[in-house]
Amino acid sequence: MKRFMTAAAAVLILASALVVSPAQAAAPTVTQSPVTVLTTSGRTALTYTGYMNGESFQQDGITTVAGWQYTTFWDQSGYVNLSRRQLPGGAWQNLRLTDYVTTSTDSHNTISIGISRQDGSIHLAFDMHSSVLRYRRSVAGMATSPGTAAWSTSSFGAVVSSLTGAGMPTMTYPQFLTTPAGKLQLALRTGTSGAGDEVLYEYAGGTWASIGRFIDGTTANNNAYLFGLEYDSTGLLHATWTVRETSNASTNHDLYYAYSKDDGRTWRGNAGSVIATTGSAPLISNAADLRVWAIGQNRGLINQESQAVDQAGIVHVLASHLPAAAANTSDFTAARENAVLVHYWRDKASKVWHQTYTPFLERSSRGDIAVDAADNLYVASGDSSTRKLHIQTASKASAWSDWTLRYTSGAIYYSDPLVDHERLRSLGVMSIFAPRYGGSQIDVQDWTVRP
């Protein structure tokens, strides 16, 4: 079966993806618990249609480990804050790290959190956009022994600008991930928009080591923007991305995919053959068997939306771009006003990719796709024009074709909503980190899901 669809075929898929009424839908339902307020002093600077709190590329902006939920935010004074609560209903406990202050108002300069399952240390990477690394970590045991470990600012080491002693001068988009053996990894972009690479580091035994460059963009004078980088239950590491040719977002194009069987050391294309080696021969956009769906330039394709991998090893990508029948436009802002959410997924057995256009508009913000224990899908998406937050669901039983709108908020939210993937997958509750318009108040919504 061909993996690239004609426009006519895509239109047929769009027609089949009409919203199903709740009476007919097999899609999961969601029931809201009381909303908690994380802070009323979040950083309010607005750039690139988003805040420094709540951007899709934080992976993970909110996460659960050992029955405790963790998240981070910048406050209005420019300090990193780390918050936690004991699930299911504990109050938020906050640490304000005042030995470092940002002067940035750039929404790229988010905070990413990683937690080592091996030694229980908490890792923070923050405040970088084509600038030096800023990173710090806690003492061991802080997350794996939350009842006894000191929850204190003194549990964190100093801010540093290197993981291994080597200089790291042009870093952006830190993304933490955990290997099946519990090792913590960190991916970052080096270089700049339109000319950058992706590099991978690994933390084990209390130290970081460089694995190397795994996507090469500088050779072709472009850069990859990851939708996600995530392990499945069998230990395969899945990466999906789009490529940008210049600093202009209108040059975003295509969906790319590769996976690794050895924790990111070597990479295989969609068909399964090894095509790249991290460090010595990284992935490059013109390599065979990487581009799995053709999406042209000037389609309003947003970079870095989201990815999830279900228990069956099926990779799901949430992207948004113009509907199939819409004309190309190089005006990215105008294209985003008509962008719809599109679900791409890879059947693991056949290795065939599928596409479903949903009828849901998104505009300037980006959504987050997540999966429950039964492999049903959930999307939290914003709309920067209406300032409303939406939840859409789809069932595995329908092959994720019954996309149904389950919730629309009042006109109070902005920037990108973030889902706690681990809590949804393991505990059946979807927590959503949701900044309110204006940026000062950040809510955490909790939804019990019912497949």
Image: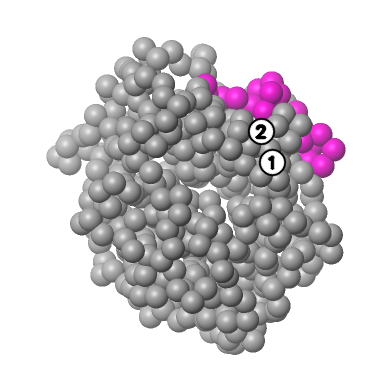
Between residues 268 and 135, which one lies in front from this camera angle?
135
Answer whether residue 91 is magenta in the image. Answer: no
Residue placed at 38% from the left, 28% from the top? 322
Is 418 placed above or below 25 here? below
Residue placed at 62% from the left, 67% from the top? 124
Residue 232 in sight in this render: no
Residue placed at 56% from the left, 24% from the top? 292
What is the CA distance from the residue labelled 1 to the residue labelled 2?
Answer: 6 Å
Extent of the magenta region: 275-295
264 sits to left or right of 392: right
Between residues 366 and 61, which one lies in front from this camera angle?
366
**Residue 30 placed where, x, y %?**
26, 54
Residue 162 in sight in this render: yes
**Which color scheme did the rendering employ for the protein?**
one colour
Res. 121 image quadrant: bottom right
Query: Label for residue 222?
Result: 2
